[in-house]
Image: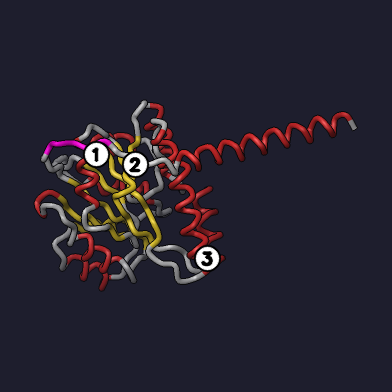
Amino acid sequence: MQLFNIIQWILIIYSTSVVLFLLGYAILGKIPYHPKHSTKKYKHKIALFIPGYKEDEVIVSVAQKALQLDYPKDKYDVIVIADSFKPDTIAALKSLPIKVIEVSFEKSTKARALNKAMSQLSSEYEIALILDADNVLKKDFLNKINDSFNAGYQVVQGHRTAKNLNTPVAVLDAASEEINNTIYSLGHRVIGLSSRLVGSGMAFNYPLFKNTMATIDAIGGFDKELELKLLKKKIKIEYRHDAICYDEKVHQSDSFAKQRMRWLS
C-alpha cells in the first residue's frame, strides 16, 4: 500500500508539473510579442521550396499563387520538387516560370527530396523557405521573413494557420495548431527562447540549412531533428506571428490519425 501511495504521488506531481508548465507558456503567449525589425532595405535571394509527393490535385494552383507574392520577382524562385507526379502535372508545372526538379526514391521523404533538390541548385540563394504542397502564403510573407533576416536572425518560423474549417476534424486540427503556436512559439519568444519549427512556413539561412539537412535522413518529423540540431548550435529561432502561411487541414478523423502517426515515426 505504501508503494502504491508513492507511485500515486509521483504521478500527481508529474501531471501537475506538466499542466503548470503548459499553463505558464499559454499565459506568456497572450503577452504581445514584438519581433525585432530592421531599417535595412536589402532583399535576400530566396529559394521557395515546395516538395510534393503525388500532390497532383493542388500543386499547380499552389505554384501559381506562390508566383504572386509581393516581393521582387528577380529575388525569389519557386522550386517545386516533384515526386511521383503525373506527366500532365509535370507539363503544367514546366509551363510556369518556376524551377521543377523531378525526384524518385524507394522510400520518399521530405528530407530526401529537399537534399536532392539542393544538390542540383547553384549557391546563389541566401534564404531557403520550406512549404508544404498545399500551403498558400499571404502576399507580404516574404517581406516579413526578409525583415527578420535583416535584423540578424538565421532561422524564422512563420505563423502557420488554417486555410479551411469545413469539417469538425478540420476545426480540431486548426485549434490544435493555434494552441501550439501560442504555447511553443509566442510563449517561448516572449521570454527569449527559440520558437518551435512546424515543418512548413519556415525559413533558413541557405548554407546553414543545406549543411544541416545533409546530416538528416528522417522518415517523418524531419523538422524536429532539424530544430534539435539548430538548438545544439545555439541558433535562435525567431517567430513571425504576422507572416501568415495558410495550411490545408485534414478533413476526416482517419486522415488526422494517420498524419499524427506519421509525425511520430
**Picture coordinates of residue 118, whole percent (x, y):** 25, 45
* Quarter residue 11 falls in: top right
Q: Amino acid at mark 3?
A: Val
Q: Is residue 57 above or below residue 191?
A: below
Magenta stretch, residue numbers: 36-40
Mark 2 nearby-residue class (10 Å; few <14, some 14–19, many ≥20): many
> With 90 as the anchor, is 110 left or right in this view?
right
Q: Earlier in the sequence, mark 1 or mark 2?
A: 1
Q: Which residue appears at 37% of the width and 53% of the height? A: 160
Residue, disc 2: 239
Is 102 inside the magenta-drawn segment?
Answer: no
> With 35 as the anchor, is 31 left or right in this view?
right
Judging depth in this view, the residue of 39 and 221 nearest the camera is 39
Q: Is residue 233 above or below residue 94?
A: above
**Picture coordinates of residue 191, whole percent (x, y):** 42, 31
* Separation of residues labelled 1 and 2 (CA atoms): 9 Å
Residue, disc 1: 148
Q: Amino acid at mark 1?
A: Ser
Query: What main secondary structure does the magenta stretch of the protein show?
Result: loop
* Separation of residues labelled 3 and 1 (CA atoms): 34 Å
Judging depth in this view, the residue of 159 and 255 nearest the camera is 159
* Quarter residue 54 falls in: bottom left
Which disc, if any, is residue 123? none
Residue, disc 3: 169
Determine the secondary structure under disc 1.
Answer: helix
**Picture coordinates of residue 234, whole percent (x, y):** 36, 26
Quadrant placement of the N terminus:
top right
Determine the secondary structure under disc 3.
Answer: helix
Determine the secondary structure under disc 2.
Answer: strand
